[in-house]
Amino acid sequence: MSVFDKDLFDTGLAKRKATLGEKYVEQSLVKADEFTRPFQETMTAWWWGFGWGDEVIDAKTCSMMNLAMLGAMGRIHEWELHCKGGLNNGVSK
């Protein structure tokens, strides 16, 4: 974890687990290999820690913006995952 700030990683890990579920996140980290581990760590620190951890925009709004972007890009597999996360963050059906 020398590439990034550990506090940012820890913040991101908590946000990621709260949104996507602890089991999903832990499985993603355990399955990471030498090639994918740096991506998992960087994504957790920067996307979740820096981006979602900022708190300027609440988690519900972040989820709604994320769903709009993923839908516009046609990323249905990711949309389905983040739809469940959005519900965890207070987005209504």
Image (cartoon, grey):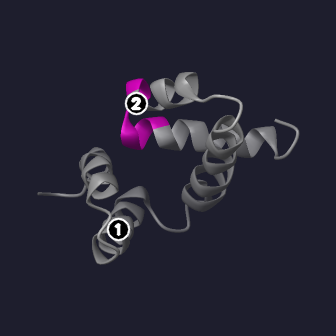
Q: Which residue does the image show at 69% across and 48% down from the upper left?
A: 42
* The N terminus, quarter of image: top right
Indicate left or right for 45 with 72 as reference. right
Mark 2: give few (<14), some (14-19) or many (20+) Cα within 10 Å.
Answer: few
Q: Which residue does the image show at 71% across and 30% down from the upper left?
A: 34
The kind of residue tagged 2 is: Tyr
Predominant SS along the magenta part: helix
Indicate left or right for 39 with 70 as reference. right
Indicate left or right for 45 with 86 as reference. right
How far from the left and from the top, in percent, is residue 92? 16, 57
Residue sitting farthest toward the bottom: 72
Mark 1: give few (<14), some (14-19) or many (20+) Cα within 10 Å.
Answer: some
The kind of residue tagged 1 is: Leu
Residue 5 position by quadrant: top right
9 and 72: which one is in front?
72
Residue sitting farthest toward the right: 2
Indicate left or right for 7 with 62 as reference. right
**How many angstroms separate mark 2 from mark 1 (CA)?**
19 Å
Query: Does 19 lie within the magenta span?
Result: yes
Label 2, on which residue? 24
8 and 55: which one is in front?
8
Task: Check disc 2 and report its element: helix, strand or loop.
Answer: helix
Q: Give the range drawn in magenta.
A: 17-23
How far from the left and from the top, in percent, is residue 66? 38, 66
Q: Which residue does the image show at 50% across and 31% down from the upper left?
A: 28
> As displayed, is residue 34 above or below residue 69?
above
Label 1, on which residue? 70
Task: Check disc 1 and report its element: helix, strand or loop.
Answer: helix
Query: Does 14 lie within the magenta span?
Result: no
